[in-house]
């Protein structure tokens, strides 16, 4: 698995994962920080995450090859003193790895971190990562959500 910035060409895969129109996903890619987890289709390649540093500026992260398959994504932004994860998809292991990016950013900037999870989406891994349920979140597409939060002084980043 490799994590990189999302590109417009990833919008079809993200739209399918979220049941949102492609145009909404493209707006999200432009308006927020969006990362995707991809697999490389080439045999013999390592499945380890090749993102060694979130700040790395490599052309490798700016391409979207036909061999890549999007297996998850995360969208987040920062407002006031909080980093807000507003959307994500993928299995628990993928989402856990994707949460590393906003977690590192929040830790580096001394900000709290919040994740919004649909009520009908069993994401116990969010609690296992140290997030605490702090109340209802916004409704998305008529679906209720729960806000999970880690205070800045409780973030422990490896």
Image (spheres, rainbow, N blue to C red):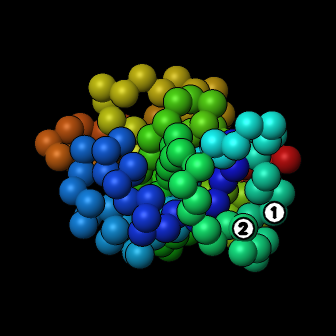
Asked if residue 19 can be seen in this view, the reply is yes
Is label 2 or label 1 in front?
A: 2
Percent from the top left, x then y, of residue 91?
52, 30
Percent from the top left, x then y, of residue 141?
17, 46
The correct choice, above or below, for 110 with respect to 95 in the image is: below
Residue 30 placement, left or right of 3 = left
* Quarter residue 121 falls in: top left
**How many residues crowd mark 2 within 10 Å: few (<14), some (14–19), many (20+)?**
few
Q: Secondary structure at mark 2?
A: helix
Residue visible at 72% across and 67% down?
Answer: 60
Asked if residue 150 can be seen in this view, the reply is no
**How many residues crowd mark 1 within 10 Å: few (<14), some (14–19), many (20+)?**
few
Q: Assign the N terminus to one quadrant of the image.
A: top right
Q: Are marks 2 and 1 in contact (CB under 8 Å)?
A: no
Q: In the depicted view, which residue is nearer to us: 30 or 82?
A: 30
Residue 56 placement, left or right of 140 = right
The residue labelled by disc 1 is 53
Residue 26 placement, left or right of 151 = left
Residue visible at 54% across and 54% down?
Answer: 66
Q: Secondary structure at mark 1?
A: loop
- What distance separates the C-alpha of mark 2 from that of mark 1? 13 Å
| Residue ranking furthest to the left | 142
Q: Which of pointers 2 and 1 lies earlier in the amino acid sequence?
A: 1
Q: In the depicted view, which residue is nearer to us: 101 or 114?
A: 101
Residue 150 placement, left or right of 12 = right
Residue visible at 26% across and 60% down?
Answer: 22
Percent from the top left, x then y, of residue 120?
30, 26
The residue labelled by disc 2 is 60
* Mark identifier at residue 121: none
Residue visible at 76% across and 73% down?
Answer: 58
């Amino acid at each position: 698995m490799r994590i990189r910035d999302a590109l417009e060409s990833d919008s079809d895969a993200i739209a399918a994962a979220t049941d949102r129109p492609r145009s909404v996903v493209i707006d999200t890619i432009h308006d927020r920080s969006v990362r995707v987890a991809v697999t490389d289709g080439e045999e013999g390649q390592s499945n380890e995450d090749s993102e060694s540093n979130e700040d790395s500026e490599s052309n490798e992260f700016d391409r979207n090859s036909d061999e890549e398959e999007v297996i998850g994504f995360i969208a987040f932004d920062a407002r006031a003193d909080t980093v807000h994860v507003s959307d994500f998809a993928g299995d628990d292991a993928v989402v856990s790895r994707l949460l590393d990016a906003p977690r590192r950013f929040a830790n580096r900037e001394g900000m709290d971190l919040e994740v919004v999870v649909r009520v009908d989406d069993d994401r116990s891994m969010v609690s296992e990562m140290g997030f605490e349920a702090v109340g209802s979140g916004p409704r998305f597409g008529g679906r209720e959500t729960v806000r999970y939060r880690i205070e800045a002084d409780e973030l422990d980043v490896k």
